[in-house]
């Protein structure tokens, strides 16, 4: 492992710990000697990393530090390139453009060798079946989720029966062949999954959702884990009612 890779590994380890962690624990986690660890911490502090602590007490990295220039392993570069390619081809147009812009910003500050790795990645996204996005604007859905606003939707179930729902969206899932909104449904008084291609029309309401997004996400995940335990299957089912 090169020195640059060691420093990156150490930064990643420190970021995983929100509370002070001992030098010995960090040395074991990163696979170096305690003497090397102390030298690497001093090197990072010299580069501006706000690492607080000392031997015997433990270390903690305060938020906001970026290694200059951006440093990634080859695997991380390939993961970024693959993720950008997938979002560009399989998400909505605005999110795809955002992914391409993000990749360009990252590439602009990468060292030459890593930028070449990103631009010439050997991984690719193969062709998939056409996505069924329906009549709605997913950009508006994502905005409603961020602002914690309600949606009024005209929906057709799997049998084509129409229904009107007021929902509190908090997740947008991208499957290979469809997109799905996970939301609290006021009609059913419970969490439901709505396929985007079955939404006939949608209106973003200025009313705030009745609960915070993170709280709903946590509760929904707990319910899904219990459901999966009792009825093994995917965490996010494609059914709604």
Image (cartoon, rainbow, N blue to C red):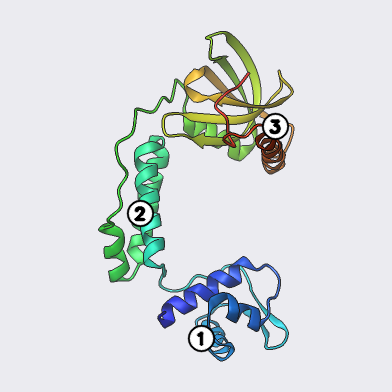
Side of 80 where 190 appears, left or right:
right
- In this rendering, the label closer to the viewer, 3 or 2: 2
Residue occupied by mark 3: 209
Near-viewer residue (87 or 224): 224
Question: Which residue is farthest bottom?
Answer: 35
Mark closer to the chain start, 2 or 1: 1
In the figure, 234 relative to 239: above or below? Answer: below
Across and down, in percent, residue 5 comes to 43, 76
Side of 58 where 174 appears, left or right:
left
Mark closer to the chain start, 3 or 1: 1
Quadrant of the image occupied by residue 223:
top right
Q: Secondary structure at mark 3?
A: loop
Residue occupied by mark 2: 81
Across and down, in percent, residue 116 comes to 26, 64
Quick one: quadrant of the N terminus?
Answer: bottom left
Label ID, residue 43: 1
Quick one: quadrant of the C terminus?
Answer: top right
Determine the CA span between mark 3 and mark 2. Answer: 35 Å
In the figure, 39 relative to 128: above or below? Answer: below
- Residue at the spot x=33%, y=61% of the render? 107
Quadrant of the image occupied by residue 74:
bottom left
Determine the CA span between mark 3 and mark 1. Answer: 48 Å
Mark closer to the chain start, 3 or 2: 2
Near-viewer residue (27 or 132): 27
Q: Is residue 50 visible?
A: no
């Amino acid at each position: 492992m090169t020195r640059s890779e060691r420093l990156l590994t150490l930064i990643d380890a420190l970021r995983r710990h929100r509370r002070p962690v001992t030098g010995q624990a960090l040395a074991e986690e990163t696979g170096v000697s305690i003497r090397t660890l102390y030298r690497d911490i001093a090197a990072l502090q010299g580069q501006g990393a706000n690492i607080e602590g000392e031997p015997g007490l433990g270390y903690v990295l305060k938020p906001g530090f970026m290694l200059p220039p951006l440093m990634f392993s080859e695997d991380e570069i390939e993961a970024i390139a693959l993720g950008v390619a997938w979002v560009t081809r399989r998400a909505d147009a605005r999110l795809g453009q955002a992914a391409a812009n993000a990749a360009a910003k990252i590439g602009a500050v990468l060292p030459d060798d890593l930028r070449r790795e990103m631009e010439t990645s050997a991984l690719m996204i193969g062709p998939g079946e056409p996505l069924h996005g329906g009549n709605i604007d997913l950009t508006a859905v994502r905005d409603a989720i961020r602002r914690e606003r309600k949606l009024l939707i005209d929906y057709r179930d799997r049998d084509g029966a129409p229904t009107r729902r007021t929902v509190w969206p908090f997740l947008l899932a991208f499957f290979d062949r469809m997109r799905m909104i996970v939301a609290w449904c006021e009609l059913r008084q419970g969490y439901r999954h709505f396929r985007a291609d079955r939404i006939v029309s949608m209106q973003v309401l200025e009313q705030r959702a009745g609960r915070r997004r993170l709280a709903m996400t946590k509760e929904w995940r707990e319910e899904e884990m219990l459901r999966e335990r009792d009825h093994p299957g995917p965490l996010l089912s494609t059914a709604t009612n």
